[in-house]
Image (spheres, grey):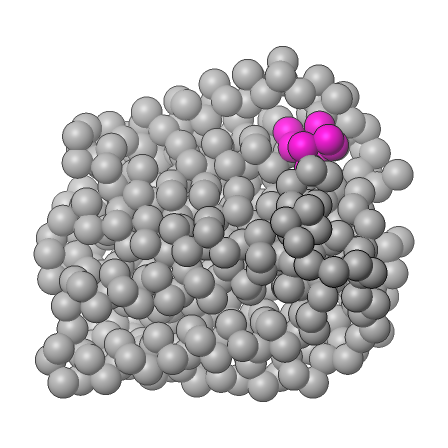
Amino acid sequence: MASPALSALIQHRPFVAFSISRLAAMMANQMLMVAVGWQMYDLTGSPWDLGLVGLFQFIPALLLTLPAGHAADHLHRGRIFSACMASQAAVAITLLAATWSGNESRTLILALSVVLGTARAFQMPAQQALIPLLVPQAILGQAIAFNAGSMQAAIIAGPAIGGVLYILGPNAVYLVSTVLLLAAALLMLSVRYSQAPPPGGTDWQTVLAGVRFVWQNKILLGAISLDLFAVLLGGATALLPMFARDILHTGPEGLGLLRAAPAIGAFLISIALLRWPLHRHTGPILLLSVVIFGIATIIFGLSTHFGLSLLALAVSGAADNISVVIRQTLVQADTPDEIRGRVSAVNSIFIGASNQLGEFESGATAALLGPVGAVVVGGIGTVLIAAIWLRLFPTLARRDRLIH
């Protein structure tokens, strides 16, 4: 029997359509990243180039996210999301054509990484700011947990399917990714909701309204920046092709499982959060989850056993997902709707920095210290960040109720 929270969410059909669209898009994106990472490593054999893939996605996201947040507050968020899916489908089609004709190259992959970063710059604020418009605030926390769970389900299935499909060649991955992305774009166009554009014109004061709001709200600033530095230091995603081939001695199918392992842990914890939502002790739980994430990252870095590596990644994913649900709920619940897109854009910058820039940091550090040294040092740094944030943001550490 479905839980009361799940039953309440299913009653909101626009939210269900949005969730299915996001599920298909995330699955396609994860499959695409498996293929791109493995193909780049096949072409160059360089950890530096694996890091550059992340950096080339981060730079346009950094430059465009604030204008994208302004667009999310003034334009139809669903249509923005659909356009971003169509753009990513175009990237998959281009990679398919290039690989089919034998014209794939390092330069092409890096150039298309810029396109992916541009699309995600507009996608993230729009999709984050959509959820509060599709469900009542009373079940906002459960809605965010449900979407986190469905996203992790896609991250589980996407890399695993992508790794298996890659055995047939990267073209198989690019073809399936294209179909899923186009389906997500079309489904999102069917979502109906009410959104009132904020009053006033467009200038730098309005574009930067989200930055000012986050800076003045120390709880949001602390939560968002904590996630930035934790994932920036502790993320090992960009190095998984190296761990798979050189340390754990597995192939593309093993890489798919490694990429899926954090999502398995995150998916299981999302189910638990949907059944037993977080209501109290928000700040302490957030900081503890970051500490656990750092410790699990250290264990993964030191492991030479495939099973232990999968377990460590699963634990890291579970801990990270707790912090994601808390942070996203705080951002959406503590922000007025008229600037929610711009605040979500600030959140997206931090997420993008932690993911894409974190991949570059991992690749650059691995070039100096090796993959094991890079991951272990990053995990230690994550634990230290949690301790520092306990002192820097006491209001966050004392935050009790998730939603006032």
Vertical relation: 94 (above or below) 359: below
Farthest residue toward the top? Answer: 391
Q: Residue at x 14, y 68 (%)?
A: 105
Q: Residue at x 34, y 77 (%)?
A: 92
Answer left or right for 344 relative to 340: left
- Extent of the magenta region: 214-222
Q: Residue at x 38, y 43 (%)?
A: 357
Give whichever of 230, 266 is nearer the camera: 230
Mark yes or no: residue 5 visible. no
Quadrant location of the C terminus?
top right
Answer left or right for 79 relative to 137: left
Give whichever of 325, 125 is nearer the camera: 125
**Residue 109, how many percent across, how many down?**
24, 65
Quadrant location of the N terminus?
bottom right
Vertical relation: 41 (above or below) 19: above
**Residue 154, how many percent across, how many down?**
51, 65
